[in-house]
Image (cartoon, grey):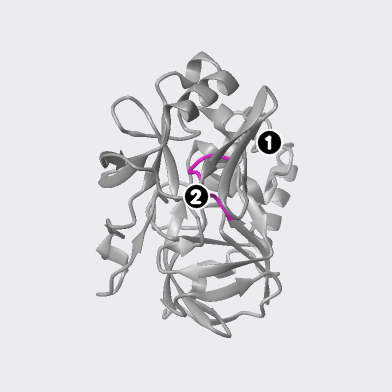
Amino acid sequence: MKITQLTVYPVKSLQGIDVTQSEIHAHGLAWDRRWMLVDSHQRFVTQRQLPALATVSVTLTPDSLVLSHPAVEPISISLEEPQGNLRLVSVWGDHCKALPESEVVSEWLEAALGEQAKGISLVRFATTFTRAVEEDFLAGGEAHTYFADGYPFLITTTGSLDALNQALVETGHTPVPMNRFRPNIVVECDDAWEEDRWATLAAEGYQLTLRKPCQRCKITTVDQQTGTIPTQAEPLKTLLALNTQPHLKGAHFGQNATLTAGEGSVIRVGDAVFVTPREA
């Protein structure tokens, strides 16, 4: 098996960047979920509330984060940390320390997305702060992440996407691309749902431990280029019917993971990967 795709999402819920390689850290791939959008109450804002966020593309230059949208000129944000007072922002049940970016970014977002983006601002994770991953699935260990939903890595496989798309086609629906699931690491694997039986995924220089099936939300229904919802409730409805995790509620696709060896190593598309099976 090998890695066929690596994707970094510098700003939570904006478009991702496909990369051929990345440094791999305990908190995730380099620059992953370093920024997040928040409302006037400092609560995180995602495509769950604002599907149009999917229309904002993101690039990284050696010195800038660049946001682009068809309605406006691109905006560049320095990679140097902004000066100013720390804010306390919330993502799910966690309160994190963050640095606010310029109000100019807020104005740009409103110009790009319209009234629905009014009051939204961009914040950067303060790396002096540590956001712990829930302990329940860490087998006594510990891990941390930035603004990801809960874990630093999401791993999916081509075999599982093929199985889901076959089920969608059989019920008269359109297949969906992998970007609907916003993974960090995609593994080429012929067998559907095989990742649910892996304990670890390793290559030369690093090892990831798969911790918890990823329960999916309505972001999977959002077209990641247009910000529209082509088919209500799909692919969630089909995932529910497939019941890949019979002992858990909800629809699941992919596995949340943490780094257990290889801090600072480089992960590459094309890396041959080896797995150890989960104990029955």
**Which one is in front in this view, the residue at disc 1 or the one at disc 2?**
2
Q: Residues within 10 Å of mark 2 (few under 14, many from 20)?
A: some
Q: Secondary structure at mark 1?
A: loop
Q: Quadrant of residue 256?
A: bottom left
- Picture residue at 41% right of the left edge, 81% below the top: 279
Q: Reading the chain from its start, which is encountered first: label 1 or label 2? A: 2
The residues bearing labels 1 and 2 have C-alpha atoms spaced at a distance of: 25 Å
Q: Quadrant of the N terminus?
A: bottom right
The region drawn magenta spans: 8-14
User: Type of residue at label 1?
Assistant: Gln
Residue at 68% in and 63% down: 159
**Is 119 on the left-hand or right-hand side of 196?**
left
Q: Amino acid at mark 2?
A: Leu
Q: Is residue 156 above or below residue 225?
A: below
Expressed as whole percent of the image width and height from the top left, the position of residue 160 reads 63, 60
Residue beneath label 1, please?
225
Q: Nearer the viewer, residue 158 or 15?
A: 15
Magenta highlight on residue 11: yes
Task: Locate residue 231 relative to residue 169 in the image: left or right.
Answer: left
Please state which of residues 235 and 134 is positioned toward the viewer in this rendering: 134
Instruction: Answer yes or no: is residue 222 visible.
Output: no
Residue at image coords 51%, 69%: 24
Disc 2: which residue: 79
